[in-house]
Amino acid sequence: MASNFAVNNIRDFEFIIQEWLPTEGVFNYPQFADYYSKDDIKSILEPVLKMCKEVIEPTNDENETHPVTFDDGKVTTPPSFGPLFHKLQEDGWGTSNIDNSPDAMVLPEMLYAAVWELIGAANPTFMPYILLTSGAAGLIQSFGDDKVKAMFLPKMMDGTWSGTMCLTEPGAGTDVGDISSKAYPTDDSRIFKIKGNKIFITGGNNDFTENIIHLYLARIEGAKPGTSGISLFVVPKLWVNEDGSFEDNDFENTGVEHKMGQHGSVTAALAAGENGNCRGWLLGIDPRENEGKGEGMAQMFQMMNMARMETGHMALSCIINAFANARDNAKERVQGRLLTNPKAGRVAIINHEDIKRTLMMGKAHIEAIRAMMYRVYLAFDQRHRDPDPAVRQAANDLIEIATPLCKAYPSDEGWWLIGEAIQSYGGYGYCEEYPVSQIARDMKIYSIWEGTNFIQSLDLVGRKMNMKGGSIFGAWVQEIVDFYEANKGNEALNKEFANLGKALDAYKEMLKALAGYSKTNMSMIPLYSHRVLTATAQLFCGRQILDQAILADKKAKDVGSDHFDYKFYTGKVATARYYVRNVVPNVWAVAEIVIDGDTSALDVPIDVFEY
């Protein structure tokens, strides 16, 4: 195997957090003011970069050399995963966004995201063990009573126990409202007997923690049908008694999936209550005391929304590492001669036009997506901590609109982008001795996890665009319009702003077409929603990366060509040019398709799909 963490610097993180985003307010929040400042970015992230290279990268090979096995109800994970899990938990990385733990390393969300972007590039398959434990602990922190918190949180936070979320069931899939797991009352009003089956549960079992705490969706007898009647339960693999001792909880791992990638991650099928003895703690209100309404889905969405951000971000991590490896290979591999100067002899392939185009395409997508995501991570910090209700509300509005973009766009684009990175290797890219094929296989799941990307597009078009009568989304579009109007006269980026303006005009016409379809032919909405999400993300990314380019252009002129940062700043401008002139035009291409309203895919009988 040829695992390779090829990311070699943190300069773009410094630019984003220290120079571009208005992060002064975040670093002045009471939770951070005495501990962090903009100047600390390097001192935090450089050791993480070193740890990724020296500690985490070596574990990535074991995804292939020691994949998960399942025998007689027991799983075996890669040997290095357990020690790595315990190290990261003990060092505080796994619980650094849970405020109330006295041992937690509390970081701003945007800085925490940078840490996990690096770790995800070094070993994406390992990440869910930590992130799911943190997310499950966060739900217990938010919705558990004092007894449940005291029982579960300390050992989840120190890495003794891990955590998962249990949603998917056979026959229900994405339609969570159809789950069949049931919960039955006991003599204790907070404890219920659980019976049901779950599938595709990432981290649903392991061999390196003494207990696994499942956040489990089920329906209490008497609750409403559909999603409104679902409740959330804390269901440990081993039941925890009052004295801390364990007993069997009738919660069995019945199998693991054999997957295209992510071979070191346990994706489990679980059976609860086959013998009638599985128990779980109810979080929140008993629906029988609330007109049959459960709180499970609303509670779970706290974890799911951040999990959607993290899923898109893991896709970005894979894209980054694929192109970092492609860059290094292109620098080292000598083949061919330049068409413009064939007599000069053979050159490294990075000098060939198509390889430079490939690498620029990767760099442009990476920096545009990263700009989008960190703008939203800033909003998470603001929503959580800002003392001004108006700031918190504005941050919440942005998060609501942007979450499906941040989840779906990177994980959609990542598949073909990493395919291009593979292509740059020629035949070597198709061989397992080189890292990009594993990166592709590991990355593909992200477009499916946490609600498929089509579901994300329906969320955008069906819900987010219509919140409060469309006023929130209208304000989001207007902010991009205002940015365009304020900067369209920028001489250094004249063509780029012309493209942004053209994309905006086309996008607004597309929204009108969608509004018409919602009244005349609803089938057109799901027909086009996925492409609409892509165009929306590209518009948003174009706006963010142009904002970066304005700043970078000014900085380049200020420091001059002899300064060590000059190439970085001019590179940022070039990247923005490429994205806005080569990617953003897809916005008006999609708009033309949507406005045209072709229904051929809807009109044909299903028999035409026989081959």
Image (cartoon, rainbow, N blue to C red):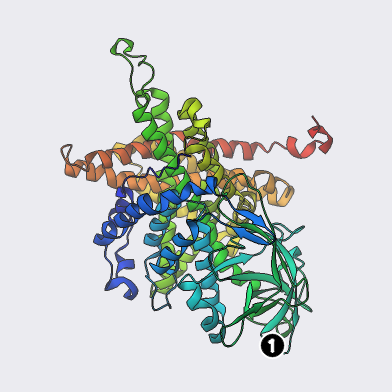
- Is residue 547 toward the left or the right of residue 313 in the image? left
**Furthest residue in direction top, as rendered:** 343
Q: Nearer the viewer, residue 328 or 34?
A: 328
Considering every residue shown, the one lying at the far bottom of the view is 187
Q: Quadrant of residue 359?
A: top left
- Callout 1: SS: loop
Quadrant of res 567: top left
Q: How many marks?
A: 1
Q: Position of residue 367 (x, y in %)?
A: 39, 45
Q: Specify whether residue 364 is in view.
A: yes
Name the residue that disc number 1 marks: 189
Q: Position of residue 192 (x, y in %)?
A: 71, 81
User: In the displayed structure, does residue 313 sit left or right of residue 233?
Assistant: left
* Residue located 37% across and 70% down the image: 105
Tell me if residue 599 comes above or below residue 310 in the rendering.
Answer: above
| Residue under the point 53% across and 64% down | 208
At horizontal 29% and vertical 48% (from top left) the residue drawn is: 11
Pick the quarter of the image with the C terminus. top right
Residue type at mark 1 is Ser
Residue name at image x 32 percent, y 41 percent: 572
Across and down, in percent, residue 77 comes to: 56, 56
In-front residue for pair 81/189: 81
